[in-house]
Image (cartoon, rainbow, N blue to C red):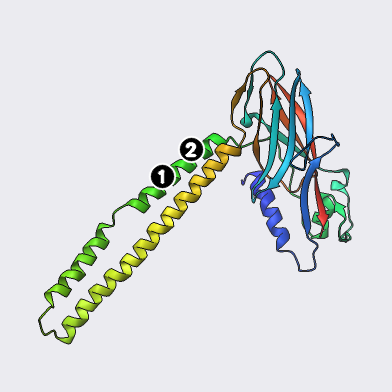
Amino acid sequence: MLPFYVRSFRWLALAGLATACAPTYQLGMKPTRATGFFVEGREQAQAVADSVEVRLSFVCYEPTRVVFEAEYRNPTRHALVVDPAAFQYEASRRADAGFDFKGRRPKPLPGTEVSAAVAAASQWLALPPLPPKPVSAFDPEPEIAALHNQAENEAAKAARIDWFGIALSAASLATDVASIGKRETVAQYQSRASIRDAAFAYNVVSAANKVEHAVTADVLQQRAAMLQDYALRKVTLEPGQQVRGYLYFPRYDAADGLVVKAPIGGSMVPLEFAQVRRRQ
């Protein structure tokens, strides 16, 4: 059975395949309750436990992930370990998720915010089931290591000497040198030309592959560097310290709310977000 977030992403893809007259929606995320705290224009949800403050703001949607930024402040006299892999969320739906539209398709007006159930009904889609258990955030460390390994492999392929291409070029050069001062038959000329053309074509393709591997290596290194710089990574906060970083969760578009549970010591504190969809 496919993971729930793959099924939910497939649900979103099916929405794009609906009839041309079906409405489309823009997804967004915001704290359920206003706090008055903002960072870079994004409103933050806030929770405090054992004097430790954690704030969370929605950053963006990626194709298969939803990105938050977490911020911890440790004013206590003891150290605190912050582990991104310990974050979880639970998805929920509004009360109209079970409403029977009696075969009628709702037609929200442009600009109207609607629930997941209304959005699905307006597109003649069935709602996928909610996640059966809390959904954990991604641990960035394995992904960073994997990206570095992939980048090194691609860089090695880009730097690898193509001995076959060298052999082809040498064979072409040898036939050209051997033909100097000799009267060739048509068959001999065509044979020499075919070797030269084959060497040229192979080396063009080989050079293009090397460039592609080099570009891929650079892109992978940039992704790894971005995660290293921006992702929330496991860290020990000493008294008076604070930390900020991105959290990556599997996205689940068919929910109306997410309760993100942030670890503080041995407890989990809830930060509630509403997932809204606005009719375009």
Residue occupying the point 76% across, 21% down? 49
Q: Is residue 134 visible?
A: no
Provide the residue designation for mark 1.
152
Q: In the figure, is residue 241 to the left or right of 141?
A: right
- x then y, percent, for residue 91: 76, 39
Provide the residue designation for mark 2.
145
Disc with the residue nearer the chain's start (2 vs 1): 2
Nearer to me, 29 or 222:
222
Q: Residues within 10 Å of mark 1 (few under 14, many from 20)?
A: some
Residue occupying the point 88% across, 47% down? 96
Q: In the figure, is residue 279 to the left or right of 193?
A: right
- x then y, percent, for residue 88: 69, 33
State how far apart marks 2 and 1 are (Cα).
Answer: 11 Å
Q: Secondary structure at mark 1?
A: helix
In the picture, the quarter occupied by the C terminus is: bottom right
Nearer to me, 89 or 81:
81
- x then y, percent, for residue 180: 12, 78
| Residue furthest top as drawn | 77
Residue occupying the point 46% across, 41% down? 148
Task: Give the amino acid type for the residue marked by disc 2 in the picture.
Answer: Ala
- x then y, percent, for residue 221: 48, 45
Residue 195 vertical placement versus 22 (above, below) = below
Task: Give the amino acid type for the residue marked by disc 1 in the picture.
Answer: Glu
Q: Residues within 10 Å of mark 2 (few under 14, many from 20)?
A: few
